[in-house]
Image (spheres, helix red, strand yellow):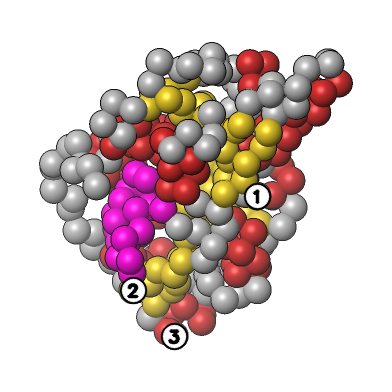
Amino acid sequence: MAQPSFAQDIKKQSVNEQLRARLPKEILDAGKMTTVNNGSFPPYEIVTGTDLSGATKDISDAIGQLLGVEVLHASVAGLPALLAGINSGRYQFAMGPVGDYPDRQKSNDFVDWVREYVVFAVEKGNPEGITSLETACGKRIAVMAGGSAEKVIKEQAQKCADGGKPAVQVQSFTDQPSSILAVRSKRSDAFFSSQAPLTYFVRQANGQLELSGVGQANGFKDIYQGAVVQKGSPLAGVLNDAFKILMDNGTYAVIMKKWGLDNNMIKAPGINQGI
């Protein structure tokens, strides 16, 4: 695992009693809340056995300190299971960040705390010449199952076929490490996913991989990602205001820079900003 790129200490937060008082009663009574992840999503969520590290873990710890509650972490396999777990009440929220899109806002509320971009991770030298969605026709493209990139690449596969070109061979995986391994082992020609984790994986690949399609829309509008809660949950407003505090006191910037996420920072959080 890569060492964090920025070593400034993360300041411990003091409990904000006004914010704490707004927590749902069941969380206050329990003195804890559980956030769920769907496996490693470096450098945000790095799952090693039962241990979690990364920017999301640091953010969760800081917010737990602000609210005066313990934040526990659970893992599930895949985004659909994550959303189902939140909507069933088994988990209070996912810190994510998870892509905020209008179709997802119908069932959940999102507290956006990063901006993201979607690009390709390819073999060094990009032998298949994958530089955009249009150049993915006939190629084997790995994606995360149930994610927004999977939807976009499947739409591109249809466009390729409609245009008389070979369709994209969409290969769906349940987690990021499996997807990137498929590219490194030449079972996939590219992994189409969020730029932040792909940058992390490329740095770990000892020169075997590179990014492609950087600086392009690649089928997406402005991408906001954030924490996820049940639709209408008061926890959304609490988390939003907690992020405001962390941004105002500099903690958010320290954590994001520590994990090399300078380019994914936003100036203020927001609820359901995805378009």
Q: Can residue 85 be seen from the camera position used here?
A: yes
Amino acid on which disc 2 is placed: Glu
Residue 112 drawn at (x, y percent): 51, 44
Which circle's residue, 3 or 1, is located before the other in the chain? 3
Q: Which residue does the image show at 60% across and 69% down from the upper left?
A: 85
**Residue count near mark 3 (Cα–Cα under 10 Å), binned few <14, some 14–19, many ≥20:** few
Q: Nearer the viewer's eye, disc 3 or disc 1?
A: 1
Q: Answer few, some or many: residues within 10 Å of disc 1's Cα (few below 14, many 20 plus, some between 14 and 19).
A: some
Q: Quadrant of residue 81?
A: bottom right
Tell me the mark number nearer the camera, choosing from 1 and 2: 1
* Residue visible at 72% across and 57% down in the picture: 107
Tell me the distance, in whole angstroms, between the alpha carbons under discs 2 and 3: 12 Å
Q: Are marks 1 and 2 in contact (CB under 8 Å)?
A: no
Examine the structure image and report whether residue 75 is included in the region drawn in magenta.
no
Where disc 2 sits, the SS reads strand
Q: Position of residue 48 (x, y in %)?
A: 31, 61
| Residue 216: quadrant of the picture | top right
Q: Under tag 1, what secondary structure?
A: loop
Q: Is residue 113 visible?
A: no
How far is the residue under mark 1 from the one under mark 2?
A: 30 Å
Q: Which residue is painted at 34% across and 53% down in the image?
A: 46
The extreme front residue here reads: 186
Q: Which residue is mark 3?
A: 29
Please say if 163 is above or below 268: above
Residue that badge 1 annotates: 146
Cα distance in 3D space between marks 3 and 1: 34 Å
For disc 2, the marked residue is: 70
179 shown above or below 229: above
